[in-house]
Image (tube, rainbow, N blue to C red):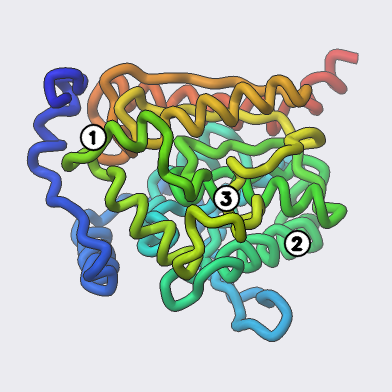
Amino acid sequence: MKERVNPELREVLEQFPPLDLDQFEMVREAGMEMIKASEIPVDERVSIADRQIPGPEKAPMVRVRIYEPKEKTETLPGLLWIHGGGYVIGSPEGDDGLCQRFVTDAKCVVVSVDYRLAPEHPYPSGLEDCYAALKWFSENASELGVDPTRIGVAGASAGGGLTAALALYARDHNGPELCFQMPLYPMIDDRNNTPSSLEITGNYIWNHDLNEKGWSMYLNGANGTDHVSYHAAPARADDLSGLPFTYTCVGQLDPFRDETLDYVTRLARAGVDVEFHLYPGCYHGFEGIAPNAEISKRAVSEYVEAANYVLHKEKLIKNKN
């Protein structure tokens, strides 16, 4: 398997310590320390601010991290970003660099959600926090200088899973209407039994065993049973119609390869416009783990450009007419 990894991605993979979700609190702390030590630069063109917004009914406030251009000359589209981490770890700060790039290159306002994590807060807590943030974003769009008809949602890994779930949830609850969803290599199938999920068993950032633990924590042990909602695991959804334009990608050596391929195929059959990229020799989260590799730079450029195109598509059409 190691010989199939893109040579540029191999060295970083060998240095990456295996995750231990049994020690999730220590992993969270280590992640925050790593973020502080990395000192992600703040783009001088971008303003970053934290804000507490109303959470779901009878639930705590939700922290969102807002990234926006310091100078606005027009109403912009919006992108709700959802961080990854197997539903168990992660924070908005870990994506500071990427969210700033969305602002500068996709020309939008980004709201990143600090949703509640499992196992302390299993499903539906995280999804409900994301939905509360989406509603707040839509209802306060004018205050943020955002066009409420041009709001998309995006995220990677578990954030991609929550992206796909939120698109279904918003469709089923009469909005807010999304113009775009970008679930990158999404964690969407709790059954954990596809050929790719069974194939990836070693230290490839995420693997079959970590996937089993993450889903078990998120679903309170119900993963793999008949009692899992498609709002929790979108791969279980029978009806994918009515979803917005979708962009997604996955590495060929990612355990989520096959569930992503199946999701893309069924979206296309349901009449949803979808664009998909499969990256050979790439493991889970490769573009974040090895950002200087050429294939990582290409992957990020392609999904940032996809967001830019779709979020501004309607405006481009209007201008041509």
Q: How many marks?
A: 3
Residue 100 visible:
no
Q: Is residue 294 left or right of residue 122?
A: left
| Residue at 40% from the left image edge and 51% from the top image edge | 95
User: Residue 279: x and y, percent?
Assistant: 37, 20
Amino acid type shown at disc 3: Ala
Q: Earlier in the sequence, mark 3 or mark 1?
A: 3
| Residue at 44% from the left image edge and 69% from the top image edge | 118
Q: Earlier in the sequence, mark 3 or mark 2?
A: 2
Q: Nearer the viewer, residue 174 or 144?
A: 174
Quadrant in which the C terminus is drawn: top right
Amino acid type shown at disc 2: Lys
Q: State the separation of the CA atoms marked 3 and 1.
A: 28 Å
User: Residue 18: x and y, percent?
Assistant: 16, 51
Which quadrant of the structure image shows residue 252?
top left
Q: Residues within 10 Å of mark 3 (few under 14, many from 20)?
A: many
Q: Is residue 85 above or below residue 43?
A: below
Quadrant in which the N terminus is drawn: top left
Labels 2 and 1 touching (C-beta < 8 A): no
User: Residue 254: x and y, percent?
Assistant: 34, 32
Which quadrant of the structure image shows residue 178?
top right
Q: State the separation of the CA atoms marked 3 and 2.
A: 21 Å
Q: Nearer the viewer, residue 216 or 206?
A: 216
Q: State the separation of the CA atoms marked 2 and 1.
A: 34 Å
Read off the residue under disc 2: 135
Read off the residue under disc 3: 233
Instruction: For mark 1, give the secondary structure.
Output: loop
Q: Residues within 10 Å of mark 2 (few under 14, many from 20)?
A: some
Residue 190 visible:
yes
| Residue at 59% from the left image edge and 26% from the top image edge | 264
Q: Earlier in the sequence, mark 2 or mark 1?
A: 2
